[in-house]
Image: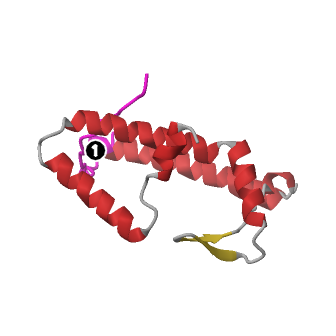
Amino acid sequence: MKKELSKINSMPASKDELKLFIQNVKTDILSGNHNPLKIAVMLKSMEEIVKELRGDEEIKRIIEDEAAKYTEKTFNFENFQITKTGRSSKDFSVCNDKVYDDLVIELNKTKEMIKAREKMLETGINPETGEVFQKPLVSYQNIISITIK
């Protein structure tokens, strides 16, 4: 087994282990003994690893093949419950239904009108009528964006 996979296999494998792991990591971070930016970039790296591996079509296929060996829709595997499901999507644009198509056009026009109205409301005044509005409530949140180079 390669060292990368052994790192994945050493991760918590139950709810209790997961809770304890998270609490211990949080305590360590808050202790001030570690650079929080170093932890943040490592967490970003972990997110990217999970995203790439979970999204890989070959990996998805072999996971689905392995799950297919279980006849039940929902089954237990180690400390996890796994449920096999499917998802369908429908494209109504191919139905050649004028009523539907007109509704979609109207919806898009309405969305554009809402955006224009919101832009006007941001100013607090209607330039056409002079009507004064209360400006929208604005909340602000600091965000740290991390990109792997």
Asked whether 148 falls inside the magenta stretch, the response is yes
Pointer 1 residue: 125
Q: Residues within 10 Å of mark 1 (few under 14, many from 20)?
A: some
Residue at image position (30%, 43%) is 122
- Secondary structure at numbered mark 1: loop
Above or below, comparing residue 80 to residue 121 in the picture: below
Q: Does residue 9 appear to the left or right of 77 in the view shown?
A: left
Closer to us: 141 or 33: 33
In the rendered image, is residue 129 in sight? no
Q: Does residue 43 appear to the left or right of 93 in the view shown?
A: left
Q: Residue furthest front?
A: 1
Which quarter shows the N terminus? top right
Q: Residue furthest right?
A: 96
Asked whether 49 falls inside the magenta stretch, the response is no
Residue span colored magenta: 122-149
- Residue 128 picture location, percent across and down: 37, 41
Residue 5 placement: quadrant: top right
Residue at image position (24%, 34%) is 37
Q: Does residue 35 appear to the left or right of 89 in the view shown?
A: left
* Amino acid of disc 1: Ile
Closer to us: 97 or 13: 13
Closer to us: 125 or 33: 33
